[in-house]
Amino acid sequence: MDQLSLLIILTAALVTPLTMAWLRLSILPTAVVEILVGILLGPSAFNLVHSNTTLTLLSNTGVIFLLFLSGMEIDFSLFNRRRVPQTPLAAKVASQAPKYSPVFLAVTSYASIVVLALLLGWACVWLGLFKDAWLAAIIFMTISLGIVIATLKEKELLSKPFGQTILLIAALGEIVPLFALTLYASIFGSNSQSLWLLLLIFLAAGILFLRFKPFFNFYERINKSTTQLDIRLAFFLIFSLVVIAESVGAEGILGAFVAGIVMKLLQPHEDTKVRLDGIGYGFFIPIFFMMSGADLNLRQLLAQPATLLLIPAFFVAYLLAKVAVYAILRLRFHRKNALAGTAISSVTITMVLAVLQVAKTMHAVTSQQSGAFLLAAILTCVLGPLVFNLSYAAEAEDLKQTTVHFIGTNLWTVPVAQQLAKGWYTITMYTDKAANYRTYNSEAPVELLDTLEPADVEQQDAFDADIVVLGHFNATKNYQLAKAAKAYGVSRVIARFEDRNVLDAREDELNELGIEVFDTPNVNIAMLRSLIETPATSQLLTSSATTVYEVTLRNRRYTDQAIRQLPFIGNITISQIFRDRHFIRPTGATTLKFNDRLIFTSSPETAREIRRELGILN
């Protein structure tokens, strides 16, 4: 019978995502659907699954693995202090940045959540809905980081200020309740020990971090598919810290969460994270979610009038705890996005399940109250993503195009600027020749400079760009401007050198500064050689239908995927991949890695979409 229940759960875990894909059901998070499926399989409906020793063990491992992976999702760069601008351009960009940073908005938002959760906890006691104000407050201040991350990833928002703000709020919504729960269990638990012993968890975490800090450098030299040492290290960290946590009277989930943080700080490879996700979300975590639903008996819960009152009361409390987030997000974001951010911040399920699991062992919650908390949390997971998807609209700062400034307006630079202007670029051209200004002003956005002295060019904001192209015929002037642009802080400077004497004398210096250089003779020689060796080169480079493009893969949605699995592979041809300073000739089975530079051919319209899709940092 035990094996039959496990088989049914595993079958449901396989069929559920397939059914969601077939029905195109993306409005609900998978975790919520799995809990609902568990409710259907348990005594609430078909009564096919019954809790047993095996399922309990796997479910407990699932919550431990879930908290471990949640710890690995924390982006500690969000907590970094703003760097002091090192260049004039960086200082100017910083001065124009919005007044309120994502860190300030997130910390202020979560502080308001904590205050409101405490007030709501005492309100529950005053109204007779729940007897423990502290435990209720911990539950109301929780946020489901996993669901928030999944929702932000779908909208490609993790690298945007709005996404960073919501992500940090959600991270605090797991970290703070977890530590609050640990303190609660240590103070009120029957087998609690001294609070100072909790420091042993962090001491052990620090020792493990220092011990394994060089692990992934060493791992490169000894890795074998039959050893999987990175996965063995992950399980060692998990169970070491879980055992230490439980030994000092804390909860095992705290040890698992800290283990995830340690693993994150060790900077594992991207494929390590993918395989750990596969183990967790492929086996243990679905069992935990489904058993959370299967352990509910809605027939008994809903048969009691008190439970029917508790569900809407707790649901409203979940929402009210996050209501002040809207006003704080409005300090930087527009109304719809403030509403979307508030809605997705109200989503909670993961930590609620963990808190309720601890509360049950402490006999601090009844089955009716536990069921009401859980069902109300499920409702937030339905409402939150729905409101978010209906409300969110891109912020103006997220739609900023790449700025390219051409210094030197002539027959060579104007056609290039015109073609780039059709893509995701904002183009401005500069010239010091009045005749060229009159000639090309109607062809492209051109501004007239008094002189090409670096100080004058800088004063007229010609260096305020992501890319500066120096296309003047005078090689000496391009050299001076290139150095000035780099010193000003321009990330990419491309300079033209027709005089080889000027270039040969300064090429090493320019390369050291990171200035990209070219000259027409070498370009023509390379082009002629390509025409001889590859006759279709000219047609490929000049065709309006198909052209060569390059993009750096930053979107983690497409990392560790085979090329044949890309949804748009039928519209492009990937000819080369530049990885670790080497070119790779790809096949359909070649797996893409983060920061791969893909050289591909496609139509201009398709290329614009693909470069934006693959190049988004997510």
Image (cartoon, rainbow, N blue to C red):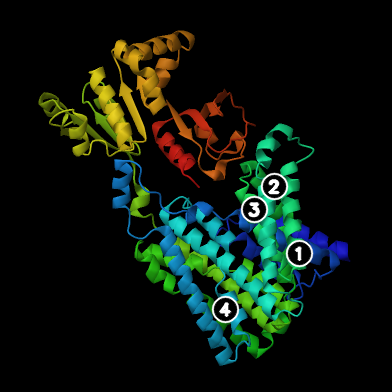
SS for callout 2: helix
Location of residue 477 (image quadrant): top left
* Residue where numbered disc 1 is placed: 59
Q: Which mark is residue 137?
A: 4
In the image, residue 194 sits, relative to residue 278, either above or below, namely below
Disc nearer the start of the sequence (3/4):
4
Calculate the distance from the C-alpha at mark 2 to the C-alpha at mark 1.
31 Å
> Residue 337, how many percent across, how many down?
40, 62
* Residue where numbered disc 2 is placed: 211
Q: Does residue 322 appear anywhere in the picture? A: no
* Residue where numbered disc 3 is placed: 262
SS for callout 1: helix
Calculate the distance from the C-alpha at mark 1 to the C-alpha at mark 4.
25 Å
Q: Nearer the viewer, residue 203 or 9?
A: 203
Q: Select label 2 or label 1 by which is in front.
A: 2
Calculate the distance from the C-alpha at mark 3 to the C-alpha at mark 2.
11 Å
Q: Does residue 230 appear anywhere in the picture? A: yes
Q: Select label 1 or label 4 by which is in front.
A: 4
Disc nearer the start of the sequence (2/4):
4
Q: Select label 3 or label 2 by which is in front.
A: 2
Calculate the distance from the C-alpha at mark 3 to the C-alpha at mark 1.
23 Å
SS for callout 3: helix
In the image, residue 521 sits, relative to residue 469, either above or below, namely above
Q: Residue furthest top?
A: 532
Disc nearer the start of the sequence (3/2):
2
Calculate the distance from the C-alpha at mark 3 to the C-alpha at mark 4.
28 Å
